[in-house]
Image: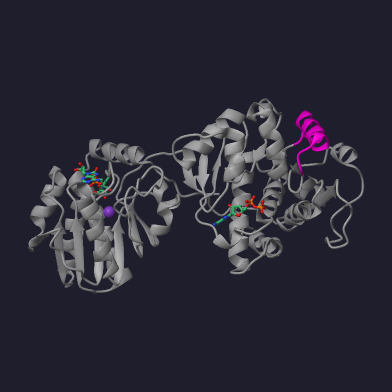
Amino acid sequence: MSERPIWSAAEMRAAEEAAIAAGTPVETLMDRAGRAAAEAIWRFAGPLPALVLCGPGNNGGDGYVIARVLKARGMDVAVAALGDPKTPAAHAAAGAWAGPVATFESAEPRPLLIDALFGTGLRRSLDDGVAAQLAALAEDAAVRVAVDLPSGVATHDGALLSPVPVNDLTITFATLKPAHRLQPAARHMGRIVVAAIGVAGESALAEIGRPLLRAPGPDDHKYKRGFVLVAGGDLAGAAELAAEAALRAGAGAVRLLGVSPSAALPRAIMQSGTIETGLDDDRLGAVVFGPGTLPGPESDLLLTQLLASDKALVLDAGALVLLANRGPDALRGLPEPAILTPHPGEFSRLFGEIGGSKVDRARAAAARSGAVVVDKGPDTVVAAPDGRAGISAGSSPWLATAGSGDVLAGAIAAARAAGFDAFAAAKAGVWLHQRAAEIAGPGLIADDVVEALALAFAECT
Ligand SMILES: NC(=O)C1=CN([C@@H]2O[C@H](COP(=O)(O)OP(=O)(O)OC[C@H]3O[C@@H](n4cnc5c(N)ncnc54)[C@H](O)[C@@H]3O)[C@@H](O)[C@H]2O)[C@@H](O)CC1
Ligand SMILES: Nc1ncnc2c1ncn2[C@@H]1O[C@H](COP(=O)(O)OP(=O)(O)O)[C@@H](O)[C@H]1O
Ligand SMILES: [K+]
């Protein structure tokens, strides 16, 4: 599985510095960035009368290049600057722009707005007057484009430092940055184009991509495809959703125990036995515990049994409440790293308030617990104890419906039982879940996501 990297502002700067040290001047990088952005804008928006807003740094420098390239293509381009260029490269780019430059304050709206005020160098919120003028110009534009990042967005954590217009297109350079995928910023990007500018680097953070899953072959049997046990309790529906999700997400066999057998479930799901006997099975690839489980002495005892077993655990919902009482250290030293799937409430209950971005928080939680943490939400982050992390490329808001988390737990367990390590399984489950939600479409309920998992799985084989 190959995934799109996500670089921090510091990693982007390091890549840029490495390229410069290797002989590519910053002016060349800026020229590539501006040309690529102009090309993307030209293709996306067509030849509308454009207004390019240029800030004082290199983001503004990109803006001057864009203006020059679009004008050379015959477009009607106006430029407005927020202050004079402050970097040599931006200065050179501004010098190469032959047309007039209005002040930012005096800029009049035009159908195509190109925001090159601030990018990764933004250090604080925009001044109120600047944010208000940007909003007014965006309001009156037909197409809004952001260069690298919408101005006002914090690169690292996706916070909005001041009001930010919703863009139709954002062109970023080399790789995605965290703010392109983290909320609340992510919803302000519109379509995202990543333009190559000839810099290289490395990052432990990537976008969660479509996993490569194995369709069964001639040598397969059901247990080889993956055997999942769902340890249910109390509220049967949630455990049933997890069990059926595991089956539809590719597990060869699923057993659901701890709740009364249900005729509503597919007959393919095994429902006989006790959790104790069910656990005593070497063929088990993953155990889901928590969906539908209420905290109490009995469920707490079961958690103790599961932690003492050598099984790969996916802990969700009620199991996370039980775990919060013990503290995340209870997971340290398990033979197989557990996978935790907290929603924001469960996350803070389990790990307390952690500062930084959502990626920082998930990484800290994973390092603390030794588990893979799936920090759920519209921008789900998966983090491993060693610092590797992934951010979901997006998620249908229709997943904000009862039971959808149970479905995710089942899908993750299927990937784990299929042989993926905990980090890869968590990411695969997140991808399948969001894709299934997309397939199920608006108005979905959790049961529909379960059904659609089979189609999502098929896209990965
Ligand atoms: N890193 C790279 O490899 C490349 C970066 N490029 C562009 O360069 C940008 C980064 O350039 P810079 O580091 O110069 O940063 P920016 O252009 O994003 O902004 C920095 C400038 O804005 C000022 N500033 C920051 N926040 C402010 C605020 N709230 N109000 C008023 N002024 C504020 C700073 O004092 C500084 O002068 C990227 O976003 C990208 O668009 C491209 O030219 C291509 C190459
Ligand atoms: N607004 C939203 N946009 C996108 N995805 C969401 C949104 N709200 C919730 N989700 C996703 O839906 C699932 C909800 O899980 P959870 O809160 O545990 O629900 P439940 O307990 O009802 O099963 C998670 O996978 C989460 O990422
Ligand atoms: K910008």
Secondary structure predominantly adopted by residues drawn in magenta:
helix
Q: Quarter for ligand 2?
A: bottom right
Q: Is residue 334 magenta?
A: no
Q: Is residue 198 above or below residue 79?
A: above
What residue lies at 28% left-to-right and 61% top-to-bottom?
A: 135
> Total label count?
0
- In the rendering, at what x and y percent does residue 35 appear? 24, 59
- In the rendering, at what x and y percent does residue 83 appear? 13, 50
- In the rendering, at what x and y percent does residue 245 appear? 73, 56
Q: Which residues are magenta?
A: 294-311
Residue 72 found in image quarter: bottom left
What residue lies at 46% left-to-right and 35% top-to-bottom?
A: 355
> Viewed as shown, does residue 1 lie left or right of 179?
right
Residue 68 found in image quarter: bottom left
Q: Is residue 295 magenta?
A: yes
Q: Is residue 385 visible?
A: no
